[in-house]
Image (cartoon, rainbow, N blue to C red):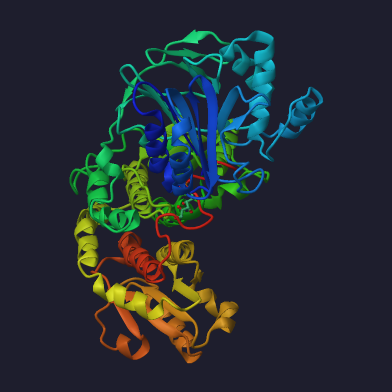
Amino acid sequence: MCGIVGYIGKRNVVDVLIKGLETLEYRGYDSAGIAVNSDNEIKVYKKIGKLINLKNLLEEKKNEINNVTMGIGHIRWATHGGATDINAHPHTCTCGKLVVVHNGIIENFKELKEDLIKKGCVFRSQTDTETIAHLFAHEYGKTHDLTLAVKKGLEQIKGAYAICVMHKDEPDKIIASRKNAPLVIGVGEGENFIGSDIPAFIEYTKKAIYLEDGEIAVVKENSLEFFDANLNKIEKKIEQLPWEPVALSKLGFKHFMLKEIHEQPDVIRNVLNGKLFDIDEPIVLDEVKIDKESLKNLNRIEIIACGTSLHAAMVGKFLIEDFTGIAVDVEASSEYIYRKTVTNDKTLVIGVSQSGETADTITAIRQAKDKGAHVLIITNRPDSSMARYADSLIPVSAGIEISVAATKSYTAQVLSFYLLAIKLAEIKGTLSPEYMKNLKHELIQVPVKIEEILNNKEQIKKVAKKFANFRNFIFIARGINLPTALEGALKLKEISYINATGYSAGELKHGPIAMLDETMPVLSIMIPGGVTYDKILSNSEEAKARNARLIALTSSKDENLKDIFEDVITIPEIPEMLSPIVANVPCQLLAYYIAEFLGKDVDQPRNLAKSVTVE
Ligand code: F6R
């Protein structure tokens, strides 16, 4: 989604802004722009499309960009008004002296706009953001104090925002503020940075200050001041960022997605590190504040998430119900927030989110908290807005994920659910010590099994090449691997645009089977040793009888499978209960190689955004 960068200091401002925007590109966007204070004028450059278009424009105009002291930049993912040059940010007031970039949505922009037009403001774009520029300029006209004008303007705004503002007549500062959208200040020496996410400035500083909702920052070259929404001065803590800039490089892989798929064994080791010491030791989840007493008080668990995180949640439901007997519901956040839920103080609500910034999930979590639920957040970003609402937290420690398609974060979320479900079973005493030891032993083996799959990619590449030109694809599974089928299909559709769907294998004959013929590949995920293998095999035979093109993803060594399936993708042996965390990897690779054969933009698929900050 949208991204913000701001800089004030002695470096080449345009370079810092463009580099910062490049690091945010992964979030998905359709236009880009910057505004700089150059020769004591506010100059705005913006262009539809990828950053290269903006760079070309800046190259053309380079002679008019001189003596630049500060600037703000933005990449936009269109919400109000189509993707055009004019709708791209930054936006200025009528006289062009005040300029703003904005992430989020201003809900009351229509009323504000009508009023501002009556007051003589001339609007040029269809965006809600332009309203902010006019509103602040109107307030500036009364006070001639940019900080005060921003405060007065923000009081009139309803909605979500992260903003950066500059004014020609106050060329020593950028004002930044946020509400329900992230914004971080990068603290330098003789320079300061602003970013909607840390990659925007990690190359220059590892010191950061996170703004809270409603706070206002006055960012100058040699100083930083912070205020609450009433302009009372406040002190803020400087945090040391754990990331190295190298985390943002592809390290020789063609795409971030491929790199992130390959990082998964280490991610798992990293997640287990400090949480699972030994098969005889209890699981350690330091920030989970649930004990025997609070668990007694619980009558159900609700897990709320979107997209890939929702699929991890489905694995979580399966595990928690199986290991503890506690009833678990899983719901898409976007559905949860628009109905009368029965959440109360006897409910544990688990929010799952890679980014921790997904608007629907944040709203759902807030609603759950208002109803008295204990909120546990599973996120890859313990510095996110969602983590701030958490009563309990599981940081999934997958490291920054750049590719829009979630891979390693999914694996880390699924693993976190294994740890949580075992932990709850330990507290409740619902699993035998032997069974738990075995589970822990198997979890420790998972990285090596994934490494085996990664070392044996050729089998998957071959299948990808063969089926890359099919327009449809079905993934089937049952039980704990149904989410694996849904996630496999989601991954394939989002990066290759193939119409891929995941079904419960048992549901195939209740409708979807009508679609089957020789143009339909069906990938069956079947893990022997459990209760579903034989059933999925029968369902696959039913598909074969309708001439579907069958592919098996299995740990079975049964040679007879070659009589039923055209291709067999083999994974290492693993108990069915642990298999989702391993079986998902070949699905990721299949999606990757198909998209790659089709020449798609793997890391930044069309229309998608990494962090969906609008409902
Ligand atoms: C798919 C994908 C999305 C996200 C979804 C939720 O690859 O990345 O479906 O899973 O937008 O995002 P988070 O997990 O950040 O809440």
Q: Is the residue 488 above or below the residue 144 in the image?
A: below
Q: Is the residue 540 above or below the residue 497 in the image?
A: below
| Residue projecting furthest to the right | 118
Q: Is residue 390 left or right of residue 435?
A: right
Residue 209, image quadrant = top left
| Residue projecting furthest to the front | 63
Q: Is residue 559 left or right of residue 20?
A: left
For the residue pair 197 and 334, the one nearer the viewer reads as 197
For the residue pair 78 and 525, the one nearer the viewer reads as 78
For the residue pair 82 and 530, the one nearer the viewer reads as 82
Would residue 389 be seen by someone viewing this image from the given angle?
no
For the residue pair 263 and 418, the one nearer the viewer reads as 263
Q: Position of residue 323 (x, y in %)?
A: 37, 53
Total marks shown come to: 0
Q: Position of residue 440 (x, y in %)?
A: 24, 52
Q: Position of residue 230 (x, y in %)?
A: 59, 11
Q: Quadrant of the C terminus?
A: top right
Which residue is depicted at the point 33% across and 48% down? Answer: 422
Q: Position of residue 5 (x, y in %)?
A: 45, 32
Which residue is depicted at the point 56% across and 21% down? Answer: 214
Would residue 488 be seen by someone viewing this image from the given angle?
yes
Q: Is the residue 129 above or below the residue 530 in the image?
A: above
Residue 581, image quadrant = bottom left
Q: Is residue 457 left or right of residue 25?
A: left
